[in-house]
Image: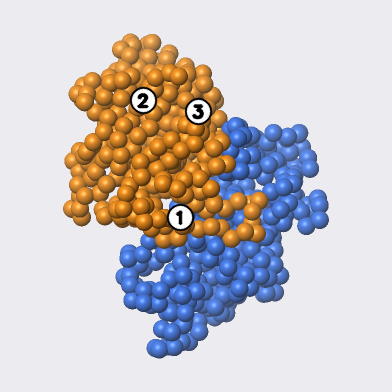
Chain colours: A blue, B orange
């Protein structure tokens, strides 16, 4: 396994000041709550779910951009969350991120040669001519022209900036890339170009990829394994074909039924889940989906379902499956 | 066949900006029949919002300028009406909802106050009657407890509920046409499904026509009878839903359909559209899609094709339509 996540947890205390805590009690936002999954070498692991379900928090926990409340993240056998600072640097080289907003994630005052060149000197020790040549190679790899190295980010379109973000991540020489909604701000025609690029690079460089998106179609297209998150919990993990052809968890089923695809153009609209998407603030002790679940029974209110293997390689958290 | 309720003819809209003249909408024509749902799709900047705003005469002029065309509503040209006449139609006969409800709701008034104001201003109801109507409107959009919601401020509501409030407001005066501009784009997919279902239900119940604008072909597919596809300010195809998805006429429609990732076709490389959208300050001569079109011939580079019937009632602006 490239990455193994165990009991990963992030709670935020949102009680406010002492007074409101005394009067209203402790308010915990359980953004990510004891989740576990593994990312195999050279595969794409898709993480899908609606806003606030904990996808991005998971990415930030794994890369240690924020500290975890609990849990372990093993990268090639070593627990990332407990690595000393010195060794973190080495780790940053192997685990790189690509972000959603191609506008915000590039420094407007840095030329592309610096954007891509920095990780080259920092992680690979390249300088001068060698650094420039390698940066040019990387631009070529992501479908940009080497002569664009001396340009500034504002001279590029959204799709091109996302390519630059990919080149920057590749410059470090990573084994694992975590991409958080990398194509969500792009139009379909440009999105297709970037998805093709990611798929090609992942295969050719044998990268492991954690691909986070709210868009089922995109995840279904790119991922080998898919985990579905809801309110801080993983509801179902399975190989992509099983998620799409034989989903077991009622939430996954609802997501798929709500998902507008071009293939289902003759179907009428229906909404299988009522109510709003909740934030897990002091969530009930049972299943997170219980208040909205179409197949709930009594024990769902009180007993939390564990993620269990119900079919080969297919794990589901639901009492009724 | 019924005479169309709304007929947009050769609509051309430009923006006069410092950088130059931007042609946002060029020669767009379509019609809307009573009770029908028309979808308009296209990628960012193609002119969907500008087209729909112009129907309500909401384009800021300057810098905007409706350089040509007619918008006939019950046969009368909305572009020739005075601002006072338009105010009698806007929000009353033709209503609009937007992607981000917060921008069109007043943050300092409760939901109830805002909706009852619609009834007082447009319909001249008294305060008491308006309040009753408001409660009815809120229950119509299936808000769980209309009375409680009426007392809330917009920011106290979740995204899906806010969009329901917007719909209640837009439908307050039982308009003949509702224009919905990306009303579900900011919502989660399960909430989006709820809102689409609600819109469809209300539309049937109130027998109104709906213009539904979206960049998402899948969303439009589930809701609409006919779909118009826009590219760089032009309407390039207007077909019934089934034909559009099974036999798209315009190469851009075909390309768009091929570029959408599909979980059932994961082993195929997506057919991305090469290049990027043309500069609207300086669009190419001829068909604006020709630089990206695999089928483009000499004619496409010089003569702009008109939107014409190519297969039954399905229209396309292309010299070489179809497969
Ligand atoms: N008030 C304005 N001033 C100047 N240019 C404008 C104005 N409104 C729109 N435009 C321009 O007109 C063109 C069409 O814009 P429009 O908003 O209709 O696109 P759209 O299809 O709705 O895109 P999106 O999917 O991003 O909402 C764009 O190039 C846009 O920048
Ligand atoms: Mg728009």
The residue depicted at 54 percent of the width and 78 percent of the height is A173
Q: Is residue B213 left or right of residue B62?
A: right
Estimate how packed mark 3 is, as few (under 14), some (14 to 19) or many (20 or more) residues with alpha carbons within 10 Å: many
Q: Is residue A148 left or right of residue A247?
A: left
Q: Earlier in the sequence, mark 1 or mark 2?
A: 2
| Image coordinates for residue B133, horizontal then vertical, percent | 42, 15
The residue beneath circle 3 is B199
Q: Earlier in the sequence, mark 3 or mark 1?
A: 3
* Residue A247 seen: yes
For the residues labelled 3 and 2, the Cα–Cα distance comes to: 20 Å
The residue depicted at 40 percent of the width and 15 percent of the height is B131
| Image coordinates for residue A35, horizontal then vertical, percent | 67, 56
Q: Is mark 3 within 8 Å of ligand 2?
A: no
Q: Chain of mark 1?
A: B
Instruction: Please tell me how many numbered marks the rendered image carries.
Output: 3
| Image coordinates for residue B299, horizontal then vertical, percent | 36, 52
Q: Which mark is residue B6?
A: 2
Estimate how packed mark 2 is, as few (under 14), some (14 to 19) or many (20 or more) residues with alpha carbons within 10 Å: many
| Image coordinates for residue A178, horizontal then vertical, percent | 56, 65
Task: Please identify, in this view, whether the residue under mark 1 or under mark 2 is nearer the observer.
Answer: 1
* Camera-side residue of A50 and A58: A50
Mark 1 vs mark 2: tell me if same chain: yes
- Secondary structure of the residue carrying tag 3 is helix
The residue depicted at 41 percent of the width and 45 percent of the height is B318
The residue depicted at 41 percent of the width and 83 percent of the height is A132
The residue beneath circle 1 is B295
Q: Chain of mark 2?
A: B
């Amino acid at each position: 396994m490239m990455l193994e996540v165990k009991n990963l947890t992030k709670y935020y205390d949102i009680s406010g000041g002492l007074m409101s805590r005394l009067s209203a009690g402790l308010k915990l936002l359980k953004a990510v709550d004891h989740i576990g999954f593994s990312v195999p070498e050279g595969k794409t692991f898709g993480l899908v779910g609606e806003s606030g379900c904990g996808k991005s928090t998971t990415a930030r926990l794994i890369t240690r951009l924020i500290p975890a409340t609990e849990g372990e993240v093993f990268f090639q056998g070593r627990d990332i969350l407990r690595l000393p600072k010195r060794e973190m640097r080495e780790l940053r080289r192997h685990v790189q991120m690509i972000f959603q907003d191609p506008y915000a994630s590039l420094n407007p005052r840095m030329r592309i040669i610096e954007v891509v060149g920095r990780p080259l000197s920092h992680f690979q020790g390249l300088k001068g001519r060698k650094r420039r040549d390698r940066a040019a190679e990387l631009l070529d790899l992501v479908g940009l022209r080497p002569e664009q190295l001396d340009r500034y980010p504002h001279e590029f379109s959204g799709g091109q900036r996302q390519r630059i973000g990919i080149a920057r991540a590749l410059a470090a020489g990573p084994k694992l890339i975590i991409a958080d909604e990398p194509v969500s701000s792009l139009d379909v025609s440009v999105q297709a170009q970037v998805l093709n690029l990611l798929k090609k690079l992942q295969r050719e460089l044998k990268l492991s990829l954690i691909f986070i998106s709210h868009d089922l179609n995109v995840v279904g297209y790119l991922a080998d394994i898919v985990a579905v998150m809801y309110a801080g919990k993983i509801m179902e993990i399975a190989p992509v074909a099983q998620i799409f052809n034989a989903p077991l968890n009622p939430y996954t089923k609802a997501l798929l039924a709500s998902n507008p695809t071009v293939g289902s153009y003759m179907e009428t609209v229906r909404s299988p889940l009522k109510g709003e998407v909740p934030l897990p603030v002091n969530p009930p002790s049972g299943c997170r989906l219980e208040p909205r679940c179409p197949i709930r029974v009594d024990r769902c209110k009180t007993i939390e379902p564990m993620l269990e293997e119900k079919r080969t390689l297919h794990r589901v958290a639901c009492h009724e499956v | 066949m019924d005479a169309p309720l709304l007929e947009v003819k050769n609509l051309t809209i430009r923006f006069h900006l410092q950088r130059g003249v931007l042609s946002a909408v060029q020669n767009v024509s379509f019609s809307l029949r009573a009770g029908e749902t028309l979808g308009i799709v296209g990628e960012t900047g193609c002119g969907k919002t500008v087209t729909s705003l112009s129907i309500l005469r909401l384009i800021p002029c300057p810098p905007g300028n409706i350089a040509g065309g007619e918008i006939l509503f019950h046969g009368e040209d909305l572009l020739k009406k005075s601002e006072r006449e338009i105010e009698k139609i806007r929000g009353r006969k033709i209503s609009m909802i937007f992607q981000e409800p917060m921008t069109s709701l007043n943050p300092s008034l409760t939901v109830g106050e805002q909706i009852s104001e619609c009834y007082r201003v447009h319909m001249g109801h008294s305060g008491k009657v308006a309040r009753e109507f408001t409660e009815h409107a809120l229950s119509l959009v299936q808000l769980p407890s209309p009375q409680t919601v009426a007392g809330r401020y917009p920011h106290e509501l979740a995204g899906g509920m806010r969009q329901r409030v917007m719909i209640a407001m837009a439908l307050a005066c039982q308009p003949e046409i509702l224009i919905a501009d990306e009303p579900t784009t900011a919502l989660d997919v399960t909430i989006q499904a709820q809102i689409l279902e609600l819109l469809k239900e209300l539309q049937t119940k109130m027998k109104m026509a709906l213009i539904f604008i979206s960049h998402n072909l899948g969303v439009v597919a589930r809701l609409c009878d006919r779909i118009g596809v826009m590219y760089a300010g032009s309407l390039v195809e207007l077909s019934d839903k089934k034909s559009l998805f099974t036999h798209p006429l315009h190469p851009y429609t075909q390309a768009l359909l091929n570029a959408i990732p599909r979980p059932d076709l994961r082993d195929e490389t997506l057919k991305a559209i090469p290049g990027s959208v043309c500069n609207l300050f300086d669009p190419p001569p001829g068909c604006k899609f020709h630089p990206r079109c695999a089928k483009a011939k000499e004619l496409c580079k010089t003569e702009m094709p008109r939107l014409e019937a190519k297969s039954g009632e399905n229209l396309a602006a292309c010299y070489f339509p179809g497969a």
